[in-house]
Amino acid sequence: MTVDIEQFLIKEDFEGYEDPAKFETFKPKIEKYLKALNDGIKPEYSITLPKSIDELVKEQFNPIEYLYKEKLLTEKEFEITDTPGVELVKQMSEGKLTAVEVFKAFVKRGTICHQFTNCAMDLFPEEGLAQAEALDEYYKKNGKIIGPLHGLPISLKEQMDYKGHIRHASYVSQIDHVCEEHGASAAILGKLGAVFYIRTTQPQTLMHLDSAQNITGYTRNPYNMSLSPGGSSSGEGSISAFGGSIIGMGSDIGGSIRGPSAFSGSHGLRPTSKRIGLLGGLSSGGGQESVMAVAGPMCRSMDDIELCMKAYINDGKPWEFDQNCLRMPWREVPKPAAKDLTIAVMYDDGIVKPTPPMERGLKETVAKLEKAGVKIVEFKPIKTELAWETVKKMYNCDGNYMQKKLLAESGEPLFPLTRWALNFGEGKTALTVAENRQLNIIRDQLRNEYNRFLLENKIDFVLSPSYNNVAPKPNQVYNWSYTGLWNILDFPTMTIQTGLFQDPKVDKYDESFKDYKFRSPVEELELTNYKPEEFVGAPIGLQLSGLRYTDEEVVAASKLIVEILDVDLTKIY
Amino acid sequence: MTVDIEQFLIKEDFEGYEDPAKFETFKPKIEKYLKALNDGIKPEYSITLPKSIDELVKEQFNPIEYLYKEKLLTEKEFEITDTPGVELVKQMSEGKLTAVEVFKAFVKRGTICHQFTNCAMDLFPEEGLAQAEALDEYYKKNGKIIGPLHGLPISLKEQMDYKGHIRHASYVSQIDHVCEEHGASAAILGKLGAVFYIRTTQPQTLMHLDSAQNITGYTRNPYNMSLSPGGSSSGEGSISAFGGSIIGMGSDIGGSIRGPSAFSGSHGLRPTSKRIGLLGGLSSGGGQESVMAVAGPMCRSMDDIELCMKAYINDGKPWEFDQNCLRMPWREVPKPAAKDLTIAVMYDDGIVKPTPPMERGLKETVAKLEKAGVKIVEFKPIKTELAWETVKKMYNCDGNYMQKKLLAESGEPLFPLTRWALNFGEGKTALTVAENRQLNIIRDQLRNEYNRFLLENKIDFVLSPSYNNVAPKPNQVYNWSYTGLWNILDFPTMTIQTGLFQDPKVDKYDESFKDYKFRSPVEELELTNYKPEEFVGAPIGLQLSGLRYTDEEVVAASKLIVEILDVDLTKIY
């Protein structure tokens, strides 16, 4: 019972992309890049791994557990890095902590994370230290913090422009590109007091829910090194869950924040489009606005997600930097009472049914929410297949013009999931502008249908799996229908950690599964890939979606939900 | 010194559009439609025109002046129809006026307007009367008004869906289409208490700043019947300036609110995109989102523009009806002090220089603003040519696929300005999706450049002509660069009446004009079309633009400006 993914990938469709000879000429540049990256691991933060990476992968090693059990940090460093950002800022504002103390604890933890998970593409601890020192100087001189994110170490997806640093967005062809200016995230968060020392991995083309690329290789899951951290904000998944930064800034056009958060073990918000800036960065989707990419925070604390959004919008005024941002203040929305909430649960999107750990995660979560007084109703999928087919076409209806250009310039080899995504929708067939407009019309009809359904049925939020499985094995994540749905709808959606983890003894298919009729080859592929013993300890993450522009309500409800579920991601071990 | 516009129009480009035989089969439907329209002129509102339409056109007849001089309304009817909507609602809420009284005064004035200007496509006074009666019933029963627009007669551009009525959007092929539901404007304004009795003209394809179409012919300017009322909200231009409705709802993708407001003599706001709903209506631009169409109000009173926006957004909650609308409340912004304002003036956009009346309008306005304490600086055009060339391509980069479909289905004859607009940009050449995405990137760069320029130079608003001329003669408006600029930038922009009118004795080219070097054939065409004696009494309208989503500030500043200019459009005669 296996499905050959090559059946979906026609070799001829990718002619003109790969060129081994040309790629060869880029290898010295990659070597140089890797050396610089490695130089970013300062001796004082360098550790001896318990075994070789290969062995650790093989035994599904859990670096987060190891971090705590082996006490790789001092007590003080644990205390700092396991304190929510809101509280750290408060302590710094009261002079109880310095930015340098905070920075040093995080850079140590983050560098350890990188040594296990390969999450970094750019490590620059000296620059970060200088930023932290400047903040302490500012505090000393002015007796107050510089802004609402004063001294908080924030990690950035590499794709986002960072002044004076290389930004290649995982395209080998772009490995020489040095940014002249900060992009929106670095510029705005930096202005608010954030400190930067790490920029993190993303997969080739940024269009995998996984991590493979030709520059630094694969990134690994911090709860089980044999698993994918998710993608495309792969490194942000690892580092935000490991606690190497207080906030990780990812981006999401099909699940690229929610996937890595769910897989790696952090909470992560895909905001409504245009609330957070995207100016300054590279993706193949420039000018594509049928389904909008968004940036958003990934954190172990829901309070820090709120802090990030509120500070970014209300203090950062992103519309002054990036005119595409809505001049829409972040509203104060109190945490709702459980009894006032109606949550509709989508147990199966009709495309790929969830695997046993995801089913269990949903059921246990629903039981706890119901017990707490939340009204739960079932959400029967509305045109999910149309939504998924439409959004896939939107991604590459330029006939992969830009992807091909960026890939072919280096001739780099294509990973299987790159070919998979390049084949989405019409594959290499470019649509006409008229056809693209028709897709937009379908999208708007879907949005209005969901909008009205929620309003008419007084449903506050929809709870669903963030993927049909827990973190998959590398190169084995094909279906994004659970996350992609909310991208085409543009509903703000939060990945919420349930505090539950895959357990191979419990999370098995029951007897009836052998009679299950797969609804598509992709479903067969996804479900047969799940073998309980291979996913030990993978976090179980769900997602909560609300109407467009109700990001505030989604965050407030998420805070209530983690409270009900009693989830504290700093206290797993 | 004339330019033949046919040089820009290649006959072969329009093959497959026109089909006289097919069009013949639609003529009985048009006849039936016109009869129904004519039946909407109730005997009690029917007037005897002073001369034939042809003669009135020939002598540049001014119906607004005639309305007052000949006292075509009773004193009470004048009083009602010349009272701002904000005040009418107040009086109705206090029981001093009934909705039926208000309605009858407006329907009379509006029906007179139609008889001069041919502004209506759909007249349904009985339905409107029933709505007004129901409001009076409501008031009697509940002792309060139903909503913030209680009893206000609002006119709608025909393009907007109206339940149970035909909506053809000036495409002959659509003349059988009866709406099943209200579109956003009728649904939301109706819910707030508005009363409807008239739906108004728009040109063929909706892509002229003029009025010609094959169903009801031309619409005429209410200040000078020989001139165009503007377009594409042609009928809304006429009726809002004539006072036949308190608010006219138009729509604008290249100047279609601001053109008719400027030409016909009302104020008109093109809001930032997505603040007002567009759901339910027809245009060829469905799914096109490189440059967004918007709907917005056209009024004789700035207070009523504010009333409309505030009620529509804060009470109407358009995002519940049309998910495309931003959940962005209308903010209360006080009228600024003149001394706190910095306005940059664009005297010439570098594409077509303004004609003498427009130059005078700008100069006299600037003098008054400066005298009142406003800081005036000059605004040198920033990449206006790139902006105009880009936005023109955006309109029809589907290779006119949808236009052709809608036109060819009836084979209706094409008006010269239809061919002109179909030839915009690449003409009939469809761009690829990749090329369309490139246009979006150019647009975003332009937006950021303007955004930063205004912020860095502390410029609050830009004042510019709303067109290079006053209202043109029919079939003679080719250049939309002044309005189109703000569409591609998506800056909220208000047409403001200066209270000035063309004066053939004053508004002449000076001697130097004979040596003027036209910068393009279009400039030659536009400027040589201006002959002072042919534009007698045309209103002079300017436009005020602010940053995206600062609609509130634009409205507040516009209120100050009409106060400084001492403009009262109900007291011209």
Image: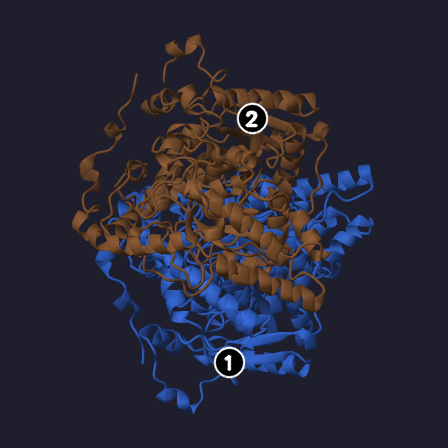
Chain colours: A brown, B blue
Residue positioned most to the bottom:
B511
Identify which residue, A12 or B181, lies in the foreground. Answer: A12
For residue A90, above or below residue B391: above
Q: Is residue B441 above or below residue A489?
A: below
Figure quadrant of the N terminus of chain A:
top left
Mark 1 — on which chain does it sit?
A: B
> What chain letter is assigned to the residue under label 2?
A
Say what secondary structure mark 1 lies in. Answer: helix
User: Position of B254 compared to A339: left or right?
Assistant: left
What is the tally of numbered marks visible in this picture?
A: 2
Counting from the top left corner in percent of width and height, residue A506 is at: 50, 16
| Residue at which label 1 appears | B359
Residue A435, quarter of picture: top left
Q: In this orientation, does residue B569 appear?
A: no
User: Percent from the top left, x then y, of residue A135?
Assistant: 61, 62
Residue B87: tell me if it is visible. Answer: yes
Q: x%, y% of residue A461?
A: 60, 32
Viewport quadrant of the C terminus of chain A: top right
Relative placement, left or right, of A295 versus B126 is left
Residue placed most toward the observer, A452 or A375? A375
Label 2, label 1: how far apart the Cα atoms are: 71 Å
Within-10-Å neighbours for mark 1: few <14, some 14–19, many 20+: some
Closer mark to the observer between disc 2 and disc 1: 2
The residue lying at 60 percent from left, 59 percent from top is A193
Quick one: label 2, few (<14), some, or many (20+) residues within 10 Å?
A: many
Tell me the residue at 66%/63% (across/down): B302
Amino acid type indicated by mark 1: Glu
Q: Which mark is residue A500?
A: 2
Disc assigned to residue A465 = none
Q: Position of residue B552 (x, y in %)?
A: 64, 60
Amino acid type, residue under disc 2 in the picture:
Leu
Name the element at disc 2.
Answer: strand
